[in-house]
Amino acid sequence: MVLEITQIGNPVLRDICVEVPKDRLLDEDFQAFVDDLIETKRHANGAGIAAPQVGEPWRIFVVEVKDNPRYPYKPEAVLTVCINPKITFLTKERYDNYEGCLSIPDLRGKVPRCPLIRVEALDRNGKKFTREVKGITAGTFQHENDHLDGILFPDRVTDYHSLSTWAEFKLRQEDGVRTSVEAIVAKWGE
Ligand code: ZN
């Protein structure tokens, strides 16, 4: 089922989300919620989505990038469900990630992100996994993980002149961003 996406101004987007209890995780209704989250992300062409974006303050997000019309220059990222995740930065380096958000219509901006992170989380079956995530995909994971702490990408924009509508971005920024994304992928992978 495609769920309604909450929009900036809705207080649920500012909640500190709560951990999903392990016994709750395997419930049929929670598993159905995970399916709905994935379906909603795909329907809206998001690179990722977090539970508060559909009104549920749980610590769960989903990342997946494949032939994405919103982000045609983003490298593909396999579907990953992260429950109760913990992210550790593995380098002091940062790069500029040009972000948008399904909960913030028609706004994009540059956010400094760490290009090498470790993600520890439970998968949808409650199994713990650890994964290193690099480059542009690492930026997507940080964006989604921020949602679980009530942080939205404009909170992290340092260069306010980078704020742009999607049309202005396409017109003025996309070619340059494509080149810098290629450089980040060449350096960090993914
Ligand atoms: Zn978002």
Image: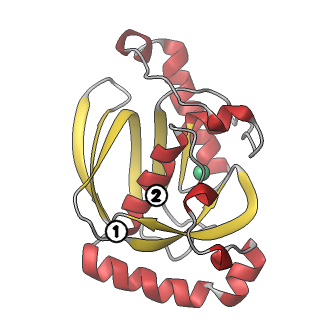
Decide: is 25 above or below 149: above
Decide: is 41 above or below 22: below
Foreground residue, 59 or 186?
59
**Quarter residue 116 falls in:** bottom left
Q: Earlier in the sequence, mark 2 or mark 1?
A: 1
**Quarter residue 46 falls in:** bottom right
Residue beneath disc 1: 135
Q: Residue at x 67, y 79 (%)?
A: 161
Decide: is 42 above or below 137: above
Q: Residue at x 51, y 38 (%)?
A: 149
Q: Secondary structure at mark 2?
A: helix
Can you tell which mark lies on residue 154?
Answer: none
Q: Are marks 2 and 1 in contact (CB under 8 Å)?
A: no
> What amino acid type is highlighted by mark number 1?
Gly
Q: Position of residue 24 (x, y in %)?
A: 44, 12
Q: Residues within 10 Å of mark 2 (few under 14, many from 20)?
A: many
Snapshot colouring: secondary structure
Number of marks drawn: 2
Q: Position of residue 37 (x, y in %)?
A: 57, 36
Q: Secondary structure at mark 1?
A: helix
Q: Residues within 10 Å of mark 1 (few under 14, many from 20)?
A: many
Residue beneath disc 2: 140
> What amino acid type is highlighted by mark number 2?
Thr
Q: Position of residue 118 (x, y in %)?
A: 25, 50
Q: The C terminus is located in which quarter?
A: bottom left
**Is the residue indicated by label 1 positioned so its CB lies within 8 Å of ligand 1?**
no
Decide: is 84 above or below 105: above
The alpha-carbon separation of the residues under discs 2 and 1 comes to: 9 Å
Q: The N terminus is located in which quarter?
A: top right
Q: Position of residue 66 (x, y in %)?
A: 49, 62
Q: Residue at x 33, y 77 (%)?
A: 185
**Is 178 placed left or right of 25 in the picture?**
right
